[in-house]
Image (cartoon, grey):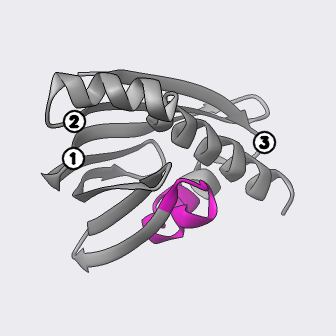
Amino acid sequence: MPFIEKTVAIKASPEKVFDLIARVEDFTKYSSLIKEISAIGPKTYHWIVNIHGIEFEWDGRVVEMIKPRKFVWQSIKGIQNSGSYTLESVKDGTRVTFSMEYHLPSAILERLAEIIAGGFMERMASEILENVKKELENS
C-alpha cells in the first residue's frame, strides 16, 4: 500500500486545529481534487475525488477522535484507505502530522494513478494542510 506522511506547523491552538479538521464536509474547501463529501451516517462520509476527469469514490468512517490530539479514519467501501491527523502542541501553536495509506483495486491501477495523477493523494494531503494552515493563521 502506498503511504503518505506530511507535517506542518500551524500558529493556532491544537483545539482550533482539531475543530477545523473534525469538520470533514468542509474539506472540499481545502483541496481542488475533492469534488464532494457528504455525510451518510454518524461519523461516516462519502467522498468523491476527481483526478484528471477520473472520479474515485469511497465511504469513510471516523474511527477515533481524541480531542485535541488525534483524528483517525478508515474507508469502509470503495477505494481502500486509512489515516490520521496527529496534533502536538508546540511553542508557537500546533504540529500537525497527516498520515495515510491507500490501496487501489490493482497494482497496475496504483502505478497508473501515480504516473497519470502525479501523486494525487500526496497533492491532496499537501493542499489540505496548507489551506487549513492559511485559514487558521489568517483568521
Q: Are marks 2 and 1 in contact (CB under 8 Å)?
A: yes
- Seen from the viewer's position, the closer of residues 51 and 80 is 51
Q: Mark 1, residues whose alpha carbon is within 10 Å: few (<14), some, or many (≥20)?
A: some
Task: Give the CA separation, mark 2 to mark 1.
Answer: 6 Å
* Rendered position, 49 above or below 120: below
Measured as percent of width and height from the top left, residue 51 is found at 47, 48
Which part of the image, by quadrant, shows the N terminus? top left
Give left or right: position of 6 versus 106. Answer: right
Numbered disc in front, either 3 or 2? 2
Measured as percent of width and height from the top left, residue 75 is found at 20, 50
Which stretch is magenta? 19-34
Task: Say which residue label 3 marks.
Answer: 11
Task: Say which residue label 1 marks.
Answer: 79
At a point 48% along the width and 35% down the height, the residue shown is 117
At a point 75% along the width and 55% down the height, the residue shown is 136
- Seen from the viewer's position, the closer of residues 6 and 49 is 49
* Rendered position, 73 above or below 39: above
Disc tally is 3
Task: Say which residue label 2 marks.
Answer: 104
Give left or right: position of 97 versus 83. Answer: right
Give left or right: position of 126 versus 51. Answer: right
Task: Please tell me whether mark 2 sits on a helix, a strand or a loop.
Answer: loop
Q: Any magenta on residue 24?
A: yes
- Seen from the viewer's position, the closer of residues 121 and 129 is 121
Mark positioned earlier in the residue sequence (3 or 2): 3
Task: Please tell me whether mark 3 sits on a helix, a strand or a loop.
Answer: loop
Task: Identify which amino acid the numbered label 1 is placed on.
Answer: Ile
At a point 45% along the width and 61% down the height, the residue shown is 22
* Rendered position, 47 above or below 104: below
Task: Give the CA separation, mark 1 to mark 3.
Answer: 33 Å
Task: Identify which amino acid the numbered label 2 is placed on.
Answer: Leu
Q: Mark 3, residues whose alpha carbon is within 10 Å: few (<14), some, or many (≥20)?
A: some
